[in-house]
Image (spheres, grey):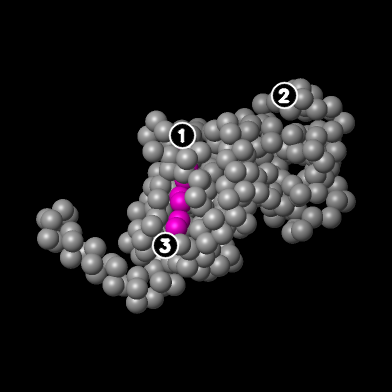
Amino acid sequence: MATEVMTRGAGSMRIDERIADRHDALTPQERRAAATLLEHLDDLATYRAAELADLAGVSRATMSRLFRSLGFEDFDEVREHLRALRSAGEPRRIDGAPNAEALASLEQAAILRAIEHPRIPEVAGRLALATRVLVIGWRNSYPIALHLREQLAQARSDVLIAPAPGQTTGEELVGLGQDDVIVVVGFRRRPQGFAEFLTEASGTGASVVLIGDPTAVAHASQASIWLECPLQHSLAFDSYAAPMALVSVLADAVLGACGRAGSRRVGRITETYERMGEVE
């Protein structure tokens, strides 16, 4: 095993967690190589090291240095690591019917990692005290962002969602300032322009909270607070059970932080529902 010192024990960490843990210490070229590994986690074992280097646009030596930095001697050890993950119940591809018990166990582990994040109380406090809150997400992140907005709107006023269907996002940032909070939901397969949006969001002076899976760690330095939330990859499509659990716990904490004002708002909303006959 390579002798690189890591923040936590390398042997207990998956390759995506190792990349997140070591990201700030990597060189720019190694970060490019790491991004390629993350993009191809599902089929990484089908490549050769030289092919991965070509995909990343880096030298083979850079790719080898990255493997060693992550705690692997070489790419063969990376393959062994991936095989160990599969044997432990973390398959990268569907192969027959899923094992329901193993799947439930993995989901539970991911949810616990998400909802035990130590900075949730801090984020909840900022969301409760902010003048305005903008929640934004694209593609698969949009349903998470929308759900968070709907929950926060029960506890406090002036919570917006973006982007509106078919619309741009630049106009959403104008007028935001240091008393506001922007929550950016950025799970993998983020759109082009994601980094540019974070730069503009930070430039408003508002607090920027970034919620994403470990592949978003490259953008963490642009946020005021980084909430890492795992995705479960056992099935063909990513499971968003952990992000939805994180949203629920975060919204609950915001309601608690809003105190009586939050409870009164919930009561008024319920009365409005009843007058309008809007929900059963």
Instruction: Residue 210: tell me if it is visible.
Output: yes
Residue at the image point whose x is 53% and y is 43% from the top: 187
**Disc 2 to disc 1, C-alpha distance:** 31 Å
Q: Secondary structure at mark 2?
A: helix
Give the magenta range: 132-138
Q: Amino acid at mark 2?
A: Leu
Q: Which mark is residue 168?
A: 1
Asked if residue 149 lies left or right of residue 197, the reply is left
Give the overall secondary structure of the magenta segment. strand
Residue 76 seen from this side: no
Q: Secondary structure at mark 1?
A: loop
In primary-sequence order, the first of circles 2 and 1 is 2
> What separation in Å lies between label 2 and label 3 (alpha carbons)?
40 Å
Residue 108 x %, y %: 48, 57
Amino acid at circle 1:
Thr
Residue 155's place in the image compared with 215, above or below, is below
Which-is-in-front pick, marks 2 and 3?
Answer: 3
Instruction: Let me know if residue 53 is in the magenta part.
Output: no
Q: Residues within 10 Å of mark 2 (few under 14, many from 20)?
A: few
Question: Could you tell me which quadrant the C terminus lies in?
Answer: bottom left
Q: Earlier in the sequence, mark 1 or mark 3?
A: 1
* Number of residue marks: 3
Q: Are marks 2 and 3 in contact (CB under 8 Å)?
A: no
What residue is shown with label 2? 55
